[in-house]
Image (spheres, helix red, strand yellow):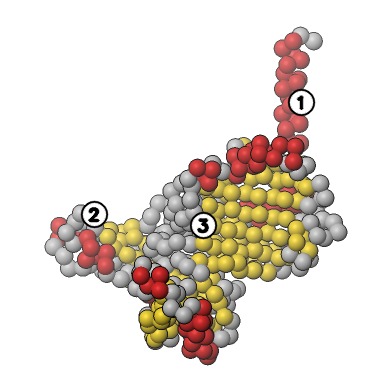
Amino acid sequence: MNYGGRLCIACLAGLLLMACQPYSYKERGVPNQVELSPQLQALFAQTKLVCFGRYVLAVPVEAELIFGPQDFPAEILTHVGAASRAKDFAEAHRRSVLARNDTAVVTYFGPGPTSHSFEIRSFENKNAKAYGNEDAQTFVVSGKHLFEWSYGGEELAPLVRGLRARDNAEIPRDPGVCIDHGFITDSSGKYQEILRAGIVLPSLPDISFSVDSNKLASVDGANGEGLLASIAAQKADLGKLYPKLTTLREGKRIVGVWQGEESLVRRADGTHDFEWEAVGKERTTLHPSSIGAKMYTKVAANRIGAADEASLSDDEAVALWDRLLDGLRFRVDAPPTQTGKPVTVRSGQVVPRSGMWRASLPSGHPMGAWVAGKSGVVRQAGTPMISFGLSPSDEAQVVWTWMGEANRTS
């Protein structure tokens, strides 16, 4: 056999070997699919959507969503079933502020932005007062629940007015943020968002899968280099002390609109330690500074590696990871998480899609602020869009943008 023939056979063998590697990538950032085992096929026979923040996850029906810390634009706590105790909670917070320091002062205790809310503003000590560092805490009643914000003032008012209680099984269709037992309408995308949630699977109790995002995290220096660069730096720093790991797959990984990286390893004790992260230099709602996911096996009592053994083989762990991670996406394809081309119409034109619409004029237009300041309108598909009654030349420049489904329950 000549050299050329041997080379072709070698190339073919290499391609076949690559095709047989279950943990490889079939193209840049897209992994080969690992077939679900009978156990996992049964698990995913029926699925559902769960929502947290602006995201949804497609998960098995048995999955239970666990909310982690939620900041929008500051920490929010949900007191389930505590609606009747709003004033008690507010009074307890006022007393705790005064008890922490002899020079603390409460500057306001009274109604918040809505009739069903309380706001407390305070300085934690004399130094805070001298520098004008005023704290605020807002308590909002909606439905049967009480929601506590570590924030207040005029900036928070639109979010307080946009808050409503919901059953955690409900998947809202309008732009906004899902929180534990609640939903906050928002299509502006101007606030900080730190959102975390995870799922547990009763039939696989040692599995932990979670997602977190931080819209405005720092992307300076090492923070902006990505997951793989961080791992390489840790290996360089620790040298021989770096733990012995079996790498199953590592490289670029696209999830939805996010260009990220993943590292799937098995620890020496059999724990699967999977991680994916995307860094968004834009620091926008669509591309937050940091969005990532983690999955561990062999978890017990909230401790990684504490279970006697992993319930899944390598193949099963990778297949489950891929299925869950591929189910992560934005809940609504509308501003500020519009992934496609915006849907727009002009004043007087027939509306192509039912929902909420907002108007704008070109930057610098003398009527731009006035038009932008008008609240959005809800229009049904097939009806004409309203006009502002401006001069014909000005009205012709108004662009209406679809902002998502209108909230049917408010």
Measuring from the top left, give residue 324's x and y in whole percent: 66, 56
Mark 1, Cα crowd under 10 Å, few <14 / some 14-19 / many 20+, is few
Which structural element holds mark 1?
helix
Viewer can see residue 307: yes
Instruction: Check disc 2 and give the amino acid type.
Output: Pro
- In this view, the residue in front, 177 or 170, is 177
- In this view, the residue in front, 28 or 353, is 28
Relative height, residue 104 to residue 368 (above, below): below
Depth check, mark 3 against mark 1: the one in front is 3
Residue at image coords 85%, 56%: 309
Measuring from the top left, give residue 291's x and y in whole percent: 55, 53
Q: Quadrant of residue 383?
A: bottom left
Q: Which residue is mark 1?
A: 13
Measuring from the top left, give residue 121's x and y in whole percent: 40, 78
Q: Is residue 403 left or right of residue 320?
A: left
Q: Which residue is mark 3?
A: 214
Mark 3, Cα crowd under 10 Å, few <14 / some 14-19 / many 20+, is many
Residue at image coords 20%, 54%: 364
Q: What's the mark number on residue 362? A: 2
Instruction: Check disc 3 and give the amino acid type.
Output: Asn
**Quarter occupied by the N terminus:** top right
- In this view, the residue in front, 371 or 399, is 371
**Label whose residue precedes the other's in the sequence (2 or 1):** 1
**Label whose residue precedes the other's in the sequence (3 or 1):** 1
Mark 2, Cα crowd under 10 Å, few <14 / some 14-19 / many 20+, is few
